[in-house]
Amino acid sequence: MFEKYTVKIRKIKALTIKEFFQIIRDSSSILIAVIFPIMLIFIYAYGVSLDFKHLKVGLVVQDDNPDAQSFVLSLRDSEFFNVDIRRDKKELIDKLTCGDIHGIITLPFYFTRFKTAWANNIPLSNPECVNLAPLYVVADGSDPNTAHFVLNYVQGAWANYLLQQAISNKDRGFFHVNVQQRFWFNEEINSRYFLLPGSIAIIMTLIGTLLTSLVISREWERGTFEALMATPVTMREIYISKFIAYFIMGMGSMVLCVILSVFVFGVPFKGSILALFIISALFLLTALGTGLLISSAARNQFLSSQIAIIVGFLPAFMLSGFIFEISSMPETIQWISELIPARYMVTSMQTLFLAGNVWKLLIINAAFLSTMILVLFLIIFMKTKKRLD
Amino acid sequence: MKKGIYSLIIKEFLAVWQDKKSRIILILPPLIQLFIFAFAATLDVKNISIGILNLDSGKQSFELCQRFQWSPYFPHVRYLRGVEEIKDVIDNQKVIMVLFINEEFSRKLLAYKKADVEMIFDGRKSNSAQIVQGYAMQVIQNYNDELGQIMHFPVPSSINIQRSWFNPNLIYLWFNVPGLVAILTMFSTIIITALSVARERELGTFEQLLVSPLKPIDILIGKSIPGIIIGMIEGSIILIAAITAFQIPFTGSLLLLYFSMLIFVCSIVGVGICLSAICKTQQQALLAVFVFMSNAVILSGFGTPIDNMPQWLQNVTLANPLRYMLVIVRSIFLKDMPIHLALMQIYPMIIIAIFNLAISTVVFRRRLE
């Protein structure tokens, strides 16, 4: 009884070693397993950034008074703007059409008059100074996200300027509602902090789904699977050994990505390492399960890689909340995203890196992943009979 | 000789059409991508849930809460009962922002003093959080303005006049779908050309081509032209879908768009031929396309702006033809781009196209020898 068991383990061990040789000797496996993760993490770290600083905007100043100039200076010195000051709006409109600048701010000729009127407490009934600030902002709406930032930043700069004026004039109690803002988990508002943890889910999908489905369907294509079947090992032992090999590779790439994110790109890691390993292991199992299912259904490298990209990679990229907010998507797509394992992985990673151990959230996500694993493996278990058809 | 190229082109079309795999690749992924990308790839911030913790019992704080409650930006407002609840709702991502009003709020305002409120955001979603912050600040500033009037103490208005040109309601689809016209055109062009030589090599028919009376340059032309034609057709289909199904306004010149698309497709064909000449099997070619596409898309400004990248990477993007095509296609769609501005974007693409085609000729020839 015990002996039978050790034989089984020996068989699996031998098969696993065979798998590793197969991976190492194949250039496209090395490409997917080693080069891809490193390349992707670098490109996500440098190429994908939602930190809007030094936004290029045009500024038209129609008022030469020192008051207007002081506001111009405050815009020019701000780290949020990169201001291009012109007298003529025409050139700036051309630049806006080309996308060289993202917005145009106009200080109208009545800028100073508005200020003095306010300082002397004159009611602003004058038609040209409607009861709105003397600032006219145009954003390039063809890029809506950047446009939001242009509009918000100008609004913020103006509110700040007013506040400073009030303080320096020792105003009779410039009373208002003052907002103190805090960004929990990410005080510096650095988008890299949430993009890199999320990208780990995508890299693991590549290894778990794309690589696995490619390699197994290649064995079908080349007929080496039939050769394996002729040996005394069972189909399940073959699958288990493949699982072990790709599981180790996937975890290896996860560790590599975490090390790069923390030590090279300075993303803080606040959670527990144990939780990191458990959640990633669960996620990797879902990815591997998907990869195995694809390859056993397609049995053709070309088709497998296509399906793996459409079923594995694209949803992990688009529907996981890695960059794009799930709650903003149409409802049907939100439902679909519930079926994407990467969604649970991305939230867990972002939480573990930035917020620490929020057990409730982590356990719920782990539960979803475990359910998916159960379903996937039930299907695989039923499919793994030794068959040649 | 010309007849030879002509029949080679016909043969390429037949090969693409008769191969089930290529047919699937040409039709299915672009359609799936168009719909998923268009709706899912959104940086829009909608359906925002916020939490409010109001410890003040005065009229002023009630008024402020009502403004948040009825603001169209915040459809889901959740009232919290205690400070300890803030951590729970933010940590578990139930809300993206909490507005915290302390006990002294109305007392301070009635005494004509500055009253503090605190806003706490979920930094795990910093982009959305900053947009929510903008909405919340608008509500507060509106309140500030009216507060001054009600209490007979006019304060300078902090609301400035804001307009968004070209897309007044900041609809994200208008940004996204024109970009997809460029990206999906690129996808089909590169996949057709990258697979063409690799397929022949895998099937062993490449030798047959070599012994035919065609010169290498003829083979190259015969392989490129189907890619150009199919890319243009695919681009047109998506263009029609963008205008009809997605109702994106098209303000510019169609002729100008097609001219730029032709140059863009030529530069992509060059890349495709290179990849195809290097890869031995269709699977390798597909992986190479995958690597190329994911880099080209990230470095194009499709998802996140080029301006946010470090300077050295911005310089790298200058070699990416998709970068120029995205500006052109978006500007022609929404901004009615005049020809002299379009030419500024087209000429770098012409240089890239010539360079790529030249390189691909060299690589292709070397492979043949």
Image (tube, helix red, strand yellow):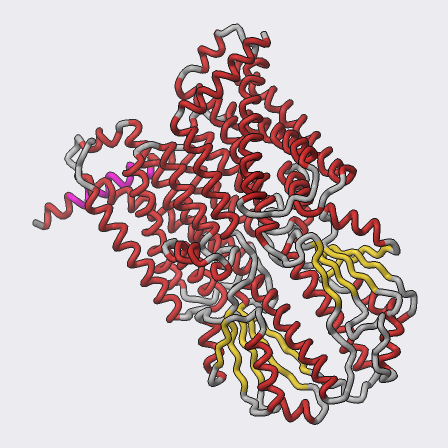
The image shows residue B43, relative to residue B204, as above or below, that is: below
Q: Quadrant of residue B296?
A: top right
User: Along the horizontal axis of the image, is A5 left or right of B117?
Assistant: left
The answer to whether residue B241 is visible is yes
The image shows residue B99, relative to residue A369, as above or below, that is: below
The residue under the point 67% across, 36% down is B254
| Farthest-out residue, left | A1
Write down the region rendered in magenta. Answer: A8-20
Count every numbered label the image shows and give the total.
0
The residue under the point 59% across, 61% down is A190
Image location (x, y in percent) of residue B7: 52, 12
The image shows residue A110, relative to residue B55, as above or below, that is: above
User: Along the horizontal axis of the image, is B9 left or right of B162?
Assistant: left
Q: Quadrant of residue A72?
A: bottom right
Viewer-nearest residue: B140 or A312: B140
**Residue B85 inside the magenta-drawn segment:** no
**Residue A15 inside the magenta-drawn segment:** yes
Say which quadrant the N terminus of chain B sits in. Answer: top right
The residue under the point 63% across, 47% down is B249
The residue under the point 54% across, 76% down is B98
Image location (x, y in percent) of residue A371: 29, 58
Image location (x, y in percent) of residue A312: 40, 46
Q: What secondary structure is the stretch in magenta mostly built from?
A: helix
User: Along the horizontal axis of the image, is A252 left or right of B46?
Assistant: left
